Amino acid sequence: MQNNLMYIHRYMMGQIRRIYFMALPESKKDMKSSRIYYTTADSAAQTIAQLAGGTFLAALMSHSGISDANIGIITSLVSLAALSQLFLINFFKRIKKYKFLVCATALQRALFAALYLIPLLGIGNVEKAVLIVVLYFVGQVFVQIGLPASQDWIASLVPSRLRGKYFSIKDSVAVFVVSGMMLICGMILDHFKKTNIMTGFNIICVLIIILTLINVIALSMMKEPKISYVNEHGKEMHGRLAKKAKDTEIAEKSQSILSEVKEAFHNRKFRKAFSIQCLFQLAFYICIPFNASYQINDLKLPYTFIMLVGFILNLYRIYITPRLGRLADKHGMAKILRFSFFALGLNFLSMAFTMPFNAYPMYILGSFFASTAWAFVGIGLFGIQLDFFKNEKRMTWLTITSSLSGVFGFLISIVGGSILGVLQKANLQLFGYKIYAQQVLNLTGFLIILFTVYFIKFHIETEKIDANRQDGRVNI
C-alpha cells in the first residue's frame, strides 16, 4: 500500500513537472495553439472580472447596505491590490518559469464566488461589508500577483509585428463571451430581484466557479517559451540536474525595490509609458467606479436593459476591434490609442449629461462611445508598454507600472468618493434641474482625457519604436 502511494505521488509530481515546468513550444503550431488557449483563458478571466465587479458587485453591495461612495472605493481595491506586485519584484526575477505561478494565482479567482454567498450569512450589514472587502481584496491580490507574469508570458508568444492583430482578435472573442454572459446574468437578476435575489446571487456564484476552472485548465494547456537551466549542449535540465545547477549557480545580487524603481524612471521611454498609464488611471478612477451605482440607484435603469444595450454594442465592438488592431500594426499603437481615448472622453461627457428624464437615450449614446473606446484602450496601453520597455527589463517594468499606477488609481478613487459625498450633500441645482455628483465627476474625467489625447499626440507618437525580434519565435 505504501509503495502504491509512493508511485502515485511520484506520478502526480511528474505530471505537474511536465505540465508546468517542461511545456516548451517546439513549433509554430505550438505557439499558435498556446495563443488560442490564452484567448480562452482570458475570456473566462474577463467574464469573472465583470461578474465580480461593476453592476453585479454594485447590486450585491447595495443589497448589503453599502453607500454609493463606498461602493466606488471598494471596487477600486483592484488598484490597491496591485501594490503587492512591487514587493515581489525580486521573487519574479528569481523564478525561471511563470506558468505554475500564473495558474496557481488564477485558481484563487474562486474567492470571488464566495462574495455572492455572504448575504446568506445571518450577520449584520457592517459585518457583511467587512467580509466583502476582505474577500474581494484578497482575491484581487492573487490576480494582481499573477498579472505581470501572464502579460510577459503572452507577449513572448506573439511576434511584435502581429500584436495589434492578435490582441484585437483575442479581445473580440472575450467581449462576445462576456457580453453574452452579462446579458444572461442581467436577466437572471431582474427575474429574481422582486422575489428572492439571493437565488440570482447563488447562480452567479456557481458560474464564477465554472469559469475559474476553465481559466486554469486553458492556462495549463499553454506552452511557455522560457528556458530555465541548460547543460553544455544547450538542452534544458530538470529534476536533480536542475537542482544541482541551481545550487552551483552564482546568485545574482538582487537590486532593492527602490533601486529598480529609480533605474526604471531614469529611462525616458519608461517615464512616458508610465505617464500615459497614470493619466488613464486618473481619468478612469475619478468617475467610473461610481457610475454603476448611479445607473442602478439614481437613473433606475433595469439590469436587463443595461445588459441588452451592452450586448448589442459589444457586437459592434467585436466588429471594429480587429480592424483597429490591423490599423495599429500599420500606423502604430499610439495613434490609434489617441482616437480611442477621445472616444472614452465622449463616453464621460455623455454620462455628464445623463439624468433620469433622458437616461435611456443618453445611456445608449454613452455606451456606443464606450464600446468604441474599449475596443482598443486596453490593447493600446499594453502595446505602448511592450514597445517602450526593454525586453530584459520587461517583467520588472510591467510590475512597477502596474503596482505604482494601481496605488495612484486607488488614491484617486478615494478622492472621487470624498468629492461624491460632498456634492451629494450640497444638493446642486442648475436651471431648475438637480445636478448629480456623478455628472460632475464624469465631466472632470472628460477634461483629463482631453489632456491625455494632447500628451499622446505630442509626446508619445513622436518616439521611435525599437521592434522586439525575439517574441513569437521558437528558440529550442
Image (tube, grey):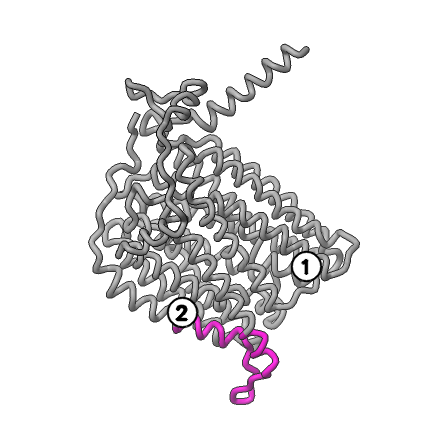
Residue 323 in view = no
Please say whether residue 424 is one of the residues in the magenta stretch. Answer: yes
Mark 1 element type: helix
Q: Residue at x 33, y 39 (%)?
A: 158
Residue labelled with disc 1 = 129
Q: Residue at x 60, y 63 (%)?
A: 71
Residue labelled with disc 2 = 346
Q: CA distance from mark 2 to mark 1?
A: 34 Å
359 is higher (above) or lower (below) than 247: below
Residue 347 spot, x, y in % from top left: 43, 67
452 is higher (above) or lower (below) than 465: below
Of callouts 2 and 1, which one flags the residue occurring earlier in the amino acid sequence?
1
Give the residue at the far bottom of this rendering.
431
Displayed quadrant of residue 157: top left
Three-letter amino acid code at disc 2? Leu
Residue 171 spot, x, y in % from top left: 42, 48
143 is higher (above) or lower (below) than 331: above
Three-letter amino acid code at disc 1? Ala
Residue 455's disc number: none
Residue 306 in view = yes
Residue range in magenta is 419-447
Lateral position of residue 114 relative to residue 75, left or right:
right
Residue 382 spot, x, y in % from top left: 36, 51
Mark 2 element type: helix
